[in-house]
């Protein structure tokens, strides 16, 4: 049984992760972390998740879990995640990271731990999304340089703070890499006013933030006479949570390194 602790256990994703661990026969709840000084410290994490007492109280410091946990799951914020990586490096723990919105400098800092922490870092833990990434790789190689325009459209709930989503950016990166392009050079993230016609090699992005949309992503390959769309729609955060727990079980016996969900699912090249 992999002993898992959830950072941000009182949040929407944290509560869903508690449910996912509870449903997984190969994992057990070792702890949950709330913000320092939170009034929720000491509350049973099962009660926070709405599934009844589980005999595990929320704590406001990772140090309190140093002897109990094998793998941390973190879907919080970049600075919090990097601090938690330092904890894992110091205490010999593993980590599953679903945090998005990291800058290039923050990702470089994260990479600095890859020789000390076994980690799975992915913008989306959904099994379906990661299969979609594989399909996009195939489609891009077959279509992308044959006169097909490429657009990425993503939709999320009104509370999401980063845009485009980490998943949308990953989809763009997969397509760009498959075509030998650099997304920083060919990605177009804003079209306003007299922006002129699209270039042949650009990869466009469009973002929607509305209501309670969990997550929808479409990559469009369009040319004269036809349009191919590859779409993934999530209707529940549970799909991400189950993937994260699966990643936690997978990384529990791995050596230090930075892995992704393609590794977890055996979809890598």
Image (cartoon, helix red, strand yellow):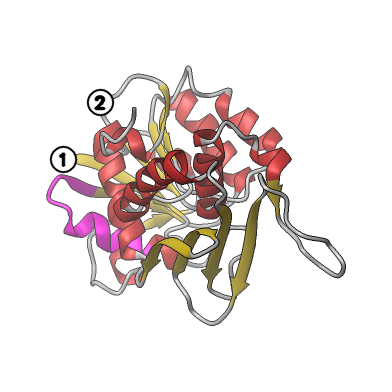
Q: Position of residue 36 (x, y in %)?
A: 57, 54
Q: Position of residue 58 (x, y in %)?
A: 39, 57
Q: Secondary structure at mark 1?
A: loop
For the residue pair 154 and 198, the one nearer the viewer reads as: 198
The residue depicted at 26 percent of the width and 39 percent of the height is: 265
Label 2 vs 1, first from the N-terminus = 1
As drawn, which residue projects farthest toward the left?
A: 25
Q: Which mark is residue 253?
A: 2
Q: In the rendered view, tell whether residue 49 sits above or below residue 267.
A: below
In which quarter of the view is residue 50 placed? bottom left
Check if mark 2's residue and mark 1's residue have beta carbons within 8 Å. Answer: no
For the residue pair 198 and 79, the one nearer the viewer reads as: 198
In which quarter of the view is residue 47 placed? bottom left
The residue depicted at 62 percent of the width and 67 percent of the height is: 207
Distance from Cα at disc 2 to Cα at disc 1: 12 Å
- Residue under label 1: 1
Q: Nearer the viewer, mark 2 or mark 1?
A: 2
| Circle 1 Cα neighbour tier, 10 Å, few/some/many (<14 / 14–19 / ≥20) | few
Please report the bounds of the magenta region as a residue range: 15-28
Is residue 256 shown in magenta?
Answer: no
In which quarter of the view is residue 81 placed? top right
The residue depicted at 58 percent of the width and 79 percent of the height is: 210
Rendered-image quadrant of the C terminus: top left
Residue 159 seen in this snapshot: yes
């Amino acid at each position: 049984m992999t002993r898992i602790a959830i950072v941000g256990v009182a949040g929407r994703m944290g509560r869903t992760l508690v449910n996912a661990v509870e449903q997984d026969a190969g994992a057990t709840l070792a702890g949950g972390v709330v913000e320092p000084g939170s009034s929720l410290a000491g509350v049973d994490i099962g009660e926070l998740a709405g599934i009844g007492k589980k005999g595990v109280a929320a704590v406001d410091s990772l140090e309190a879990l140093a002897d109990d946990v094998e793998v941390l799951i973190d879907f919080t914020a970049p600075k919090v995640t990097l601090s938690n990586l330092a904890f894992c490096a110091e205490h010999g723990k593993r980590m599953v990271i679903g945090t998005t919105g990291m800058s290039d400098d923050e990702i470089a800092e994260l990479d600095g731990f890859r020789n000390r922490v076994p980690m799975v870092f992915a913008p989306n833990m959904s099994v379906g999304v990661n299969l979609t990434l594989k399909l996009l790789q195939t489609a891009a190689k077959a279509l992308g340089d044959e006169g097909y325009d490429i657009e990425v459209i993503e939709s999320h709930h009104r509370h999401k703070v980063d845009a485009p989503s980490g998943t949308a950016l990953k989809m763009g990166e997969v397509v760009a890499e498959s075509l030998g392009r650099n997304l920083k050079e060919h990605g177009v993230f804003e079209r306003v006013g007299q922006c002129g016609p699209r270039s042949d090699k650009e990869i466009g992005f469009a973002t929607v933030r509305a209501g309670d949309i969990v997550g929808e992503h479409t990559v469009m390959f369009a040319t004269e006479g036809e349009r191919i769309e590859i779409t993934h729609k999530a209707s529940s955060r549970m799909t991400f949570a189950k993937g994260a727990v699966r990643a936690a079980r997978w990384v529990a016996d791995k050596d230090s390194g930075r892995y992704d969900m393609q590794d977890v699912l055996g979809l890598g090249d």
